[in-house]
Image: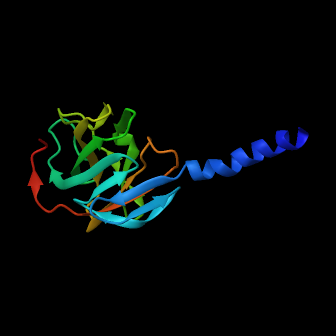
Amino acid sequence: MKKAFYTLPITVLLLLPACSQTSVEKVGGEERSSSTKTDETYQLGDTLKIDDVIVNITKAKQTDPIQFTKSKNGKIVTIDVDVRNNSKDSIFIDRHDFALVSKGEKAIGYHGYEELPLSEEVNRGEQADGKLYFDVKPADSYELVYKPNFTAAQTEIHFDIPAPTSTASSK
């Protein structure tokens, strides 16, 4: 009896890391599993299946700051995100799950547009579309780091974002 008492907790602890694997798959591509940081950097427009959630970073554009909320770093990059929840549970996706980095420096979020940044509960079978706004210093490219909060592991997914060249309205 004592032997079973000690071996059961050890067995459970050994199985926990296997349960916390996060599956990251490029739709139309090859599936991989990761428990922390993925090795691959995805491109703007790639559609990913993260466990049972489909995420697509559809476009990035430079947008003008509004009159009363100036840019501190020089320009605003607006990134469009589409999410479809095919899992059995609802998920929460938020702008705080994303960071935009250039030359090792993390961009600050921009707040000022009428349309609020992405922050939404997505129920099973539903879709959400939203925007991320970053006040950035001009650069040749950026890296969008996504840490999904609905995964068991602390997975990081990286997207290469070329610097938008044209200025568009914030809508």
Residue 59 lies in quadrant:
bottom left
Percent from the top left, x then y, of residue 41? 36, 66
Percent from the top left, x then y, of residue 27? 28, 59
Q: Is residue 63 above or below residue 161?
A: above
Percent from the top left, x then y, of residue 55? 29, 49
Closer to the camera, 54 or 1?
A: 1
Q: Is residue 47 above or below residue 1?
A: below
Determine if residue 72 is in view: no
Q: Quadrant of the C terminus?
A: top left
Number of numbered discs on residues: 0
Q: Quadrant of the N terminus?
A: top right
Residue 162 lies in quadrant:
bottom left
Q: Is residue 97 above or below residue 103?
A: above
Closer to the camera, 51 or 128?
A: 51
Which residue is the extreme one toward the front?
1
Determine if residue 3 is in view: yes
Closer to the camera, 159 or 140?
A: 159
Q: Residue at x 52, y 49 (%)?
A: 153
Q: Is residue 10 left or right of residue 108?
A: right
Percent from the top left, x then y, of residue 19? 57, 48
Q: Residue at x 14, y 47 (%)?
A: 64
